[in-house]
Image (cartoon, rainbow, N blue to C red):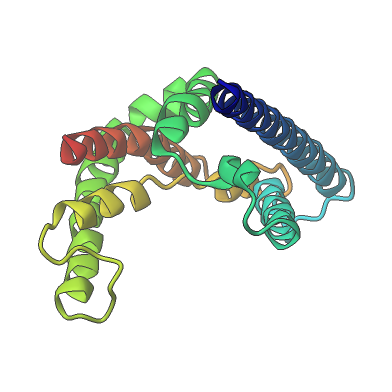
Amino acid sequence: MADVNASDDSGQASEDDDTEREHSYDANSVVLINVTLIACIYVAYLVKRHRFYTLPESAAAMLTGTVIGGVARLVSPKSDSLWILSFNPEVFFFILLPPIIFEAGYTLRRKHFFANIGPIVTYAFVGTITSTFIVAGLVYSLGTAKLTTSVDASNPMEALLFGALISAVDPVATLSIMGSPELQCDPLLYSLVFGESVLNDAVAIVLFKTFRK
C-alpha cells in the first residue's frame, strides 16, 4: 500500500513538474516574441527617421530577428522554449501571409495594375511555376548525385515543396525603396513588380498545397 502511495506521489510530482516546465516555456516564448517585435519596430523607426536608405526597414527587421534568434540559441541551445523560432509553413501561410496580401490589395493602385494585367499575370503564373520546377530540379539533382544528404532522392515531392516555398518571393525592401519620393521610380516598373509580388504568393500557396497532398 505504501508503494502504491509513493508511486502516486511521484507520478503527481512528475506531472506538476511537466506543467510548470510548460508554463515556463510559454512565458519564455511570449517574452521572446515581444522583445523581437519591439526591437524590430524600434529599428525600423530609427531607419526611417535618419533616412538610412542603404538599409531598408524590412532588411533591418530581418537583421534584428537574426541577431535576437542567434543570441537566444547561444544562451539556451537545448531549450524546448525556443520552438517558436522554428519555421512552420501553416503559421506562415495562414497567419503571417494574409495580412501582407490584404495590405497590398488595400493600397493597390488599380489604374496601373489593371492597365498592365497581362504582363503581371504572365510574370506571376508562368514565372512562379517555372521557378518552382527549376529550383526543384536543381535540388533533386543534388540529392540524386549524393552531393547532399538532406534531400530525399527517392521522392521528388520534397524538392517540389521546397521549390514552391522558395518561389514565394515578396520584394518588400525593393518596393519600399522604389516607392520613396526621392527615387521617383517609373510607375510602370513599380506596378509590374508590385502586381507580380501580390499574385506570386497565391500561385506559390496553391503549388505548395498541391504538392503536399
Q: Quadrant of the C terminus?
A: top left
Identify the residue at horizontal 56%, vertical 50% (top origin). 174
Identify the residue at horizontal 68%, vertical 34% (top origin). 21
Residue found at the far front of this picture = 1
Towards the viewer: 122 or 132? 132
Residue found at the far left of this picture = 154
Q: Quadrant of the N terminus?
A: top right
Across and down, in percent, residue 83 comes to: 56, 43
Towards the viewer: 172 or 86? 86
Q: Quadrant of residue 138?
A: bottom left
* 211 left or right, relative to 186: left
Across and down, in percent, residue 64 comes to: 73, 52
Identify the residue at horizontal 41%, vertical 40% (top origin). 197
Towards the viewer: 86 or 175? 86
**Image: 54 above or below 208:** below
Across and down, in percent, residue 148 comes to: 29, 76
* 24 left or right, relative to 208: right
Across and down, in percent, residue 176 comes to: 63, 44
Q: So how many labels did they put on this image?
A: 0
* 97 left or right, relative to 20: left
Identify the residue at horizontal 46%, vertical 38% (top origin). 194
Q: Quadrant of residue 180?
A: top right
Towards the viewer: 24 or 172? 24
**Image: 74 above or below 57:** below
Q: Quadrant of residue 202?
A: top left
